[in-house]
Image: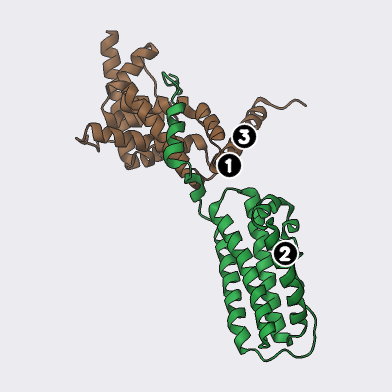
Amino acid sequence: MAPSKGQMQAQRQESRVDWEGALVQRAVAGDTRAFERLYREHSGRVYGLCLRMTKDAQLAEDCTQDTFINAWKALPNFETRSSLGTWLHRIAVNVSLGRRRKATPVLEAQGEDEEGELGGFALETPVEVAELEEAIGNLPDGARDALVLHALYGYSHEEAAQMLGIAPGTCKAQLHRARKLLRERLKLEVN
Amino acid sequence: MPRSIDPPRDLWPQIEAQLGAAGAAAPRRRTAPLRWLAAAAMVGALAVGVWIGRDLMPLPGAAAEVAQQPPANPAGANPGGAAVNAAFVSDPRYARQRAELMGSVQAQLNAMPAPARAKVAASLSAIEAAKKDLESALGKDPSNALLQELLINTYQDEMRVLTDVHEAGNAGRGI
């Protein structure tokens, strides 16, 4: 009997984890070639996250570099049972927040209301990806962070909040704010 | 929207350069598992115990059973750690000195009273077990500097115990 689609997906995921775990072990032993392969595998997602958080291509490159250098240093502490991608994202978020704080030391006000629907991210009218990227890029930092981590990268409110160093309630409020602002801005552009 | 966006240029060369410059040794800072530290501590304590005990024990009496000793070439004890061992014990001077000590210590152990002999046997047995554990761990993590250091210390502890037994026997003091 042929394996189901779900089983095949699970097998692929498992072999990927095994492969990644082996590379991590080699990297921990000092093998930079193994670490390069991990970089090649994850650099796109790390750079994408950094770019969306910093809104600056050059800064995002710096953050991506710092993320992998920090990861190399901390790799012996990485638990191979957890996801390397998630671990790298946590580092990337920390690096991006740190860089952003240096660039703009004024803290954004937080703690808005938590009302409203906070589920999936959906727009009423179709828009181009570039428009959406631009609109997300123009969101306030806190709202954008929450939206990117939760709606785009699929982290839960708790995970996103932990990465950002804020309370889950604040993360939900920021997401609500992001969705509201995004709707308004995209509607205005369409109209 | 894509989650993954490729960087506009390859960032790896710069990352690699920084790994080599600043953090190449970072992965070797791995914390050794507590059991290795515990094993090393136990070996150290037993070695100290033998050292102290040699002054307190009575003169050796009748011959008795001899403690089981590790093979002359400890590298053969653990195939996984052979490469690691080779780095430390392939020196022929070490092998020769160890073989000589083992030969003379054997006779001295035979002449010891049972309690002293048991103490030395326990020390050597603990050292042997620690060596095997460390070699096994190094087989999985060959570049772990702390494990390497512990293994060297363990070999040194073994030599210290053997030397002490040898010297005590020659001085006629017993262990």
**Dot 1 and dot 3 residues touching (CB under 8 Å):** no
Of B152 and A179, nearer the camera is: B152
Please tell me whether mark 3 or mark 2 is closer to you in this view: 2
Classify A132 as above or below B134. above
| Residue pictured at 58% horizontal, 63% vertical | B153
Identify the colour of chain B in the image: green
Q: In the image, what residue type sits under mark 1? A: Gln
Of A22 and A155, nearer the camera is: A22
Real-space Cα distance between discs 2 and 1? Answer: 37 Å
Q: In the image, what residue type sits under mark 2? A: Arg
Question: Crowdedness of circle 2 by 10 Å Cα count: few (<14), some, many (20+)?
Answer: few
Q: Position of residue A28 (x, y in %)?
A: 54, 43
Identify the colour of chain A in the image: brown
Q: In the image, what residue type sits under mark 3? A: Trp
Quarter of the image that includes the C terminus of chain A: top left
Residue placed under numbered mark 1 in the picture? A25
Q: Quadrant of residue B98?
A: bottom right
Are the residues under marks 3 and 2 on the same chain?
no
Q: Position of residue B160 (x, y in %)?
A: 62, 72
Of B88 and B41, nearer the camera is: B88
Q: Is residue A151 visible?
A: yes
Q: Chain of mark 1?
A: A
Classify B66 as above or below A107. below
Real-space Cα distance between discs 3 and 2? Answer: 45 Å
Residue A74: give its label.
none
Of B139 and A54, nearer the camera is: B139
Which comes sooner in the sequence, label 1 or label 3?
Answer: 3
Residue placed under numbered mark 3 in the picture? A19
| Residue pictured at 69% horizontal, 66% vertical | B128
